[in-house]
Image (cartoon, rainbow, N blue to C red):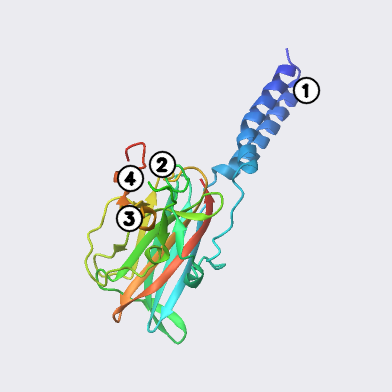
Amino acid sequence: MRSIAQHAAARRRVLCFLGVVALVVAPTALAHFVYTSGNYVSGPICVNGGSGIAEDPPQVIAEGWTQSYGQGFCLTAKNMPAYSLALRRQLYFWNGSAWSVCANSGWQYNESPTSYKSISRQWAQMPCGSGWYNHLAEAYAYYNGQWLGGARFAGNHYF
Amino acid sequence: MMRRVLTTLLLLLTALVPVGIIVAGDSTDPGRPGWVGSAGAVESDKVPAELAVAGPDGKPVVCANGKELKVKKSELLGPPPSSGRPVEPQPGDFVWRCGTGKNPHLHARLVPESLDPLDRDGG
């Protein structure tokens, strides 16, 4: 029959082991979401773009939204007519010496009036294999005969 | 007692070795591209004139003439080509692949990923 001291020692060892495993596993299990956003101000409107990349499962998001601009600020949401808000997702891959292009969504437009649109994609397996990825999101709004907006990288993510 | 210690060590190794491989391998963060500002915004005047293309295995795509495929900056950065015109949405993503003619590496074309000639899994 095992003594109380032996049981306590065994329990301590198990807890210690679980603690070490948790320290190793937990950071990798937590979803890691990298995101940036910003404004592209031009004339009376603000075109805002956001770019994100995350894991579990691997996924990216591109967002675009429009606001009226005045007194130095992006103010209230401004609806854009159909096909006047354009987004594109582009996946970049680090090939060991340089960033290279991997895949993209092609341009996607709002099909009805709106001030916000997002496009996203998930993968079971990354399309260019294992390694470092970055996500480029482009957001443009068509206003007064021209496209206004820009492109933004989310940040690096290892898959 | 000894068996328990060995089992614990074995389990620890099983957990730590993959982490070690990643840390010691090619997982060093390469940093953001040189043409990207600190907040992620692309500085288009600093973007290289052309960029290489990664294939399904992550290696640079090489065309039939033995040269690496390149995509022009003008094709990688907006604005969109059309203006306020309805565009039929396409299912799935696109990949850049070699063009045709004498210099296929200079004439990258967009191919739906489901029709990717380099995808050995058949899409």
Q: Same chain, marks 4 and 2?
A: no
Position of A8 relative to B69 (above/below): above
User: Mark 1 to mark 4: distance in Å?
Assistant: 65 Å
Q: Are the residues flagged by discs 1 and 4 from a single subunit?
A: no
Give me the residue at 35% from left, 53% from top: B104
Alpha carbon of mark 1 to alpha carbon of mark 3: how far?
72 Å
Q: Is residue A76 above or below residue B121?
A: below
Above or below, B114 relative to B75: above
Q: Which residue bears the numbered disc 1?
A: A5
Nearest-to-viewer mark from 3 and 4: 3
Point out the frontmost of discs 1 and 2.
2
Please state the horizontal and vertical placement of residue A126, each as a whole percent of the image.
Answer: 44, 45
Residue A61 locus on image (x, y percent)? 41, 57
Give the structural element (helix, strand or loop) at label 1.
Answer: helix
**Sequence-earlier tag: 3 or 4:** 3
Front disc: 4 or 2: 4
- The count of marks equals 4
Q: Residues within 10 Å of mark 4 (few under 14, many from 20)?
A: some
Q: Of the numbered discs in the image, which one, if any, rests on residue B109?
A: 3
Residue A31 in percent (x, y) is at 52, 48
Q: Assess disc 1: are there few (<14), some (14-19) or many (≥20) residues with their C-alpha within 10 Å of its C-alpha.
A: few
- Residue A75: quarter of image: bottom left
Dots 3 and 2 on the same chain: no
Label for residue B116?
Answer: 4
> In the image, which is nearer the foreground, mark 3 or mark 2?
3
Q: Residue A87's image quarter?
A: bottom left
Lower position in the chain sequence, tag 1 or tag 2: 1
Amino acid marked by disc 3: Arg
> Which mark, residue A124?
2
- The amino acid pointed to by label 1 is Ala
For the residues marked 4 and 2, what is the alpha-carbon distance in whole angstroms?
Answer: 17 Å
